[in-house]
Amino acid sequence: MSNAPDDQPQTVQDRLARLRHLAQAFPKEQREDVLLELDDLSAELRADGSSLPTLHPRLKRLAAIAMMARMFATNNQQAIEEFASNLVDLTKATKIGD
């Protein structure tokens, strides 16, 4: 896919790729944590089809890391804010409607 406008539907994997890209702006310690969590989240999504009980703790951990990065980052605040926004979008996209 090319750089699609924001109104184009995104797959969960597209959202994960965007989060991985935005994570590069995090301070080193948080960046490593975020990338590991994103890798694990991606693997879980492929393995069990996005079971909310298993995804929820990972999504909360990513949100907590983003909050911590925001407190400690002196640069790249906008990228960290965008990461948080994209994380919210991913959370909405992975919820299972029963």
Image (cartoon, rainbow, N blue to C red):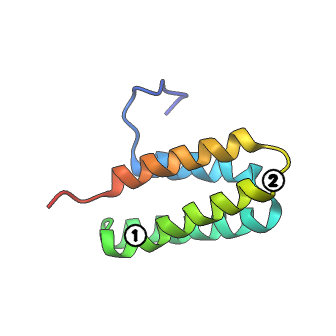
Position above or below: 94 against 33: above
**Extreme-right residue of the structure:** 74
Position above or below: 51 against 5: below
Q: How far apart are marks 1 and 2 (CA)?
A: 26 Å
Q: Is residue 52 left or right of residue 80?
A: left
Residue closer to the observer: 43 or 33 = 33
Position above or below: 5 against 68: above
Q: Quadrant of the C terminus?
A: bottom left
Task: Tell me the residue that label 1 is attached to.
Answer: 55
**Element at badge 1?**
helix
Q: What residue type is labelled 2?
A: Ala
Q: Residue at x 19, y 57 (%)?
A: 97
**Element at badge 2?**
loop
Q: Which residue is drawn at 41% across and 51% down?
A: 12
Q: Which residue is drawn at 74% across and 43% down?
A: 77
Residue closer to the observer: 16 or 25 = 25
- Label 2 neighbour load within 10 Å: few <14, some 14-19, many 20+: some
Task: Tell me the residue that label 2 is attached to.
Answer: 73
Q: Which amino acid does label 1 sit on?
A: Leu
Q: Earlier in the sequence, mark 1 or mark 2?
A: 1
Q: Which residue is drawn at 60% across and 47% down?
A: 83
Image location of residue 67, percent across then percent down: 64, 59
- Label 1 neighbour load within 10 Å: few <14, some 14-19, many 20+: some
Image location of residue 80, percent across then percent down: 68, 47
* In this view, the mark in front (1 or 2): 2
Position above or below: 53 against 22: below
Disc sitting over residue 69 in the figure: none
Residue closer to the observer: 85 or 6 = 85
Image location of residue 42, percent across then percent down: 48, 64
**Extreme-front residue of the structure:** 71
**Extreme-left residue of the structure:** 98
